[in-house]
Amino acid sequence: MKEASSVVPGLAGILVGDWKDSATYVRNKNKACASVGINSFEKCPCLYRHINEQNVLNAVNTEKDVDGFLPHWQI
């Protein structure tokens, strides 16, 4: 995609809560993205698990380099 259009896609892993398994999952997705040339970001790693959906959306809607989000929300 970068060669065809000069665009590098971006994926943001959103962690809400503090589960170690979720953090490992997102970290592995970041590694997979790097291996295929996708930028990856970890967003909101320290949000409390009881935060509401609108606050999470507000935190990530300002990201211009992100084309997709991978939410990991501890309920």
Image (cartoon, grey):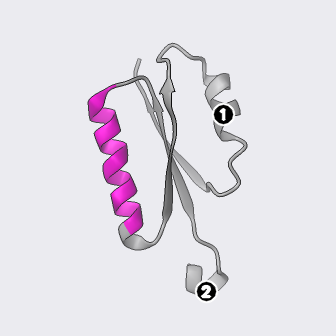
- At 29% across and 41% down in the image, what residue appears? 24
Q: Position of residue 59 (x, y in %)?
A: 66, 33
Distance from Cα at disc 2 to Cα at disc 1: 31 Å
Look at the image and say whether residue 63 sits in the magenta stretch. no
Residue segment shown in magenta: 19-34
- At 34% across and 59% down in the image, what residue appears? 31
- At 51% across and 13% down in the image, what residue appears? 50
Q: Residues within 10 Å of mark 2 (few under 14, many from 20)?
A: few
The amino acid type of the residue labelled 1 equals Ala
Q: Residue furthest front?
A: 46
Q: Position of residue 66 (x, y in %)?
A: 62, 54
Query: Of residues 69 and 40, which is closer to you in this image?
Result: 40
The image quarter in which residue 22 lies: top left
17 on left or right of 9: left
Q: Position of residue 36 (x, y in %)?
A: 40, 72
Q: Residues within 10 Å of mark 1 (few under 14, many from 20)?
A: few
In this picture, is 72 found above or below 29? above
- At 48% across and 66% down in the image, what residue appears? 38
Return the disc, 2 or 1, that comes first in the chain's sequence: 2
Instruction: Determine which residue is flagged by label 1.
Output: 59
- Mark 1 lies on a secondary structure that is helix
Q: Which mark is residue 7?
A: none
Q: Position of residue 58 (x, y in %)?
A: 70, 31
Instruction: Determine which residue is flagged by label 2.
Output: 4
53 on left or right of 35: right
The amino acid type of the residue labelled 2 equals Ala
Q: Residue furthest top?
A: 50
Residue contact at pointers 2 and 1, CB within 8 angstroms: no
